[in-house]
Amino acid sequence: MLLAVGIGAGAGAWAVDRYVGDAKRSPSLSPSLSSGLSPSLSPNPSRSSSPNSRPSPSPSLGPTPSLSTVLSPSPVAAAPAIGPIVGLGGKCINGDSSSPENGAAVRLYMCNGTNAQKWTVSSDERLHVLDKCLDVINSATTPGTMVHIYPCNGTAAQVWELWTDGSLRNPNSGLCLDVPNGDTSDGIQLQISDCNGATSQHWTLP
């Protein structure tokens, strides 16, 4: 009887030792069991994705216009008016009233409200002062040619288009009314030059 008990107790201890040993060696048992935590067996649904899924293409909006196209100046109709034409340095276009004969110089000068600065903008794109018109000398088309006042005669040398960038362009030459070298000194004579959008070619009509 004692022998049976002893054998039974020994067999029980052997069975417990074997179970614990197997548990330590088994790769199928999660280490989290030892800490009492239940492992998560379900995958995160927010991270699941179909192997065939692809990002949706962005809609095509067509070609983007270049900056030069967006900002390209164009001619506009100047409203008929009378008054000063103001340019670089806040100074005015001045017809030389001290010698108003044909060919008198047109200069940049401080604004003073005199008749030499009282320009008439006409609907035919001419600029009148002292009963004469702003004119390109000899109807020239060369950059650097000076302008003067001359009897209005309907020629292309006396046509001035206002453009959206504030320039005054002579279509006969394709050049713009310009302050040479951006010089704001009183008395600087005006010229025509290549249109470049500079402040020396920006004019505010009355």
Image: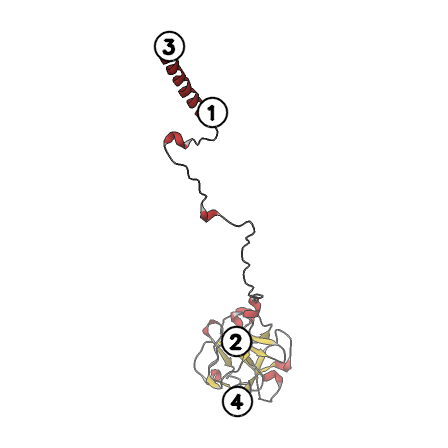
- Give left or right: position of 187 versus 174: left
Tag of residue 3: 3
User: Does label 1 or label 2 sit earlier along the sequence?
Assistant: 1
Graded by Cα atoms within 10 Å as few (under 14), some (14 to 19) or many (20 or more), the crowding at tag 2 reads some
Q: Which element is circle 4 on?
A: loop
The Cα atoms of the two marked residues, 1 and 2, are separated by 88 Å
Graded by Cα atoms within 10 Å as few (under 14), some (14 to 19) or many (20 or more), the crowding at tag 3 reads few
**Amino acid on which disc 1 is placed:** Arg
The quarter of the displayed image where residue 142 is located: bottom right
Residue drawn at x 57%, y 69% is: 69
Say whether residue 197 is visible.
Answer: no
Residue 122 in the image, given as x and y percentages of width and height: 52, 87
**Amino acid on which disc 2 is placed:** Thr
For the residues bearing labels 3 and 4, Cβ distance under 8 angstroms: no
**Amino acid on which disc 4 is placed:** Asp
User: Does label 3 or label 4 sit earlier along the sequence?
Assistant: 3
Which label sits in the foreground, 1 or 2? Answer: 1
Say whether residue 142 is visible.
Answer: yes
- Give left or right: position of 147 versus 82: right
Residue picked out by circle 1 = 25
The quarter of the displayed image where residue 171 is located: bottom right
Graded by Cα atoms within 10 Å as few (under 14), some (14 to 19) or many (20 or more), the crowding at tag 4 reads few
Which label sits in the foreground, 3 or 1? Answer: 3
Residue 154 in the image, given as x and y percentages of width and height: 60, 88
**Amino acid on which disc 3 is placed:** Leu
Which label sits in the foreground, 4 or 2? Answer: 2
The Cα atoms of the two marked residues, 3 and 1, are separated by 33 Å
The quarter of the displayed image where residue 31 is located: top left
In depth, the one of 97 and 79 nearer the eye is: 79
Tag of residue 131: 4
The Cα atoms of the two marked residues, 3 and 4, are separated by 146 Å
Residue 57 in the image, given as x and y percentages of width and height: 55, 59
